[in-house]
Image (cartoon, rainbow, N blue to C red):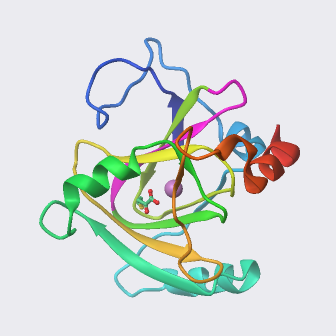
Amino acid sequence: PLQAWKFNPTQEDQRELHKFDPNQEVSIQELAALGVLYWNIPVTDDEKHMESVETICQERQYKNRDVINIKRDTLPNYDQKIKTFFEEHIHEDEEIRFILDGSGYFDVRNKDDEWIRVAAKKSDMIILPAGMYHRFTLDTNNYIKAMRLFKEDPQWTPLNREVETTDTNKFRLDYLKEFH
Ligand code: KMT
Ligand code: NI
């Protein structure tokens, strides 16, 4: 199952675990209450997992997808992108990620504006609702390959917190109404 915990904001590198001692686990139910959805779809060599992906795409009307391979050697502008992914932001659409290989962390804000660190690994599909503050980092394995699914055209420009007027963004207000 998915592992999630309260993020301990120490000065350590963003790729480290950032757990409190003792660890403060966060359950899938708590994540669901914040609007975070999760499925485990085993990724196999025969590509059987794509049948489940197709079904989810049809049910939830995801029309577009691409695959991102986040590794120093394969991702153009690697350092800049790693930095951008870790800036706190929202989107005006769901953020849907299906992890094909490797692992990484999605940090999401809870109702008290604390970070929850969600560990995503191969075979996890994670959906963050529109308007939820979040960020992403690789872990110390330094590699993730993920399918990114989109409702419409890849229209997932990050709106960074404070830089833009995200607290009054319509999608932010809709999120708060539904989940807080
Ligand atoms: C994002 O929006 O932060 C990304 O696409 C990077 C993470 S995908 C595993
Ligand atoms: Ni995002």
Which corner quadrant of the image does residue 11 belong to?
top left
Q: In this view, does 107 lie to the left or right of 78?
A: right
- Residue drawn at x 25%, y 57% is 143
- Residue drawn at x 43%, y 12% is 21
Camera-side residue of 118 and 62: 62
Is 134 magenta? The answer is no
Q: Position of residue 46 (x, y in %)?
A: 38, 87
Camera-side residue of 48 and 170: 170
In this view, which residue lies farthest toward the top? 21
Q: Where is residue 74 in the image (x, y as percent from the top left)?
A: 17, 70
In this view, which residue lies farthest toward the right? 177
Q: Position of residue 131 (x, y in %)?
A: 69, 52
**In the image, is residue 171 above or below residue 32?**
below
The total number of labels drawn is 0
- Residue drawn at x 27%, y 23% is 12
Q: Position of residue 173 (x, y in %)?
A: 80, 47
Classify the position of the C terminus by image quarter.
top right
Is 112 magenta? The answer is yes
Q: Can residue 79 be seen in this view?
A: yes
**In the image, is residue 160 above or below residue 41?**
above
**In the image, is residue 116 above or below residue 155?**
above
**In the image, is residue 59 above or below residue 178?**
below
Which corner quadrant of the image does residue 179 belong to?
top right
Camera-side residue of 41 and 116: 116
Q: Can residue 2 be seen in this view?
A: no
Residue span colored magenta: 102-113
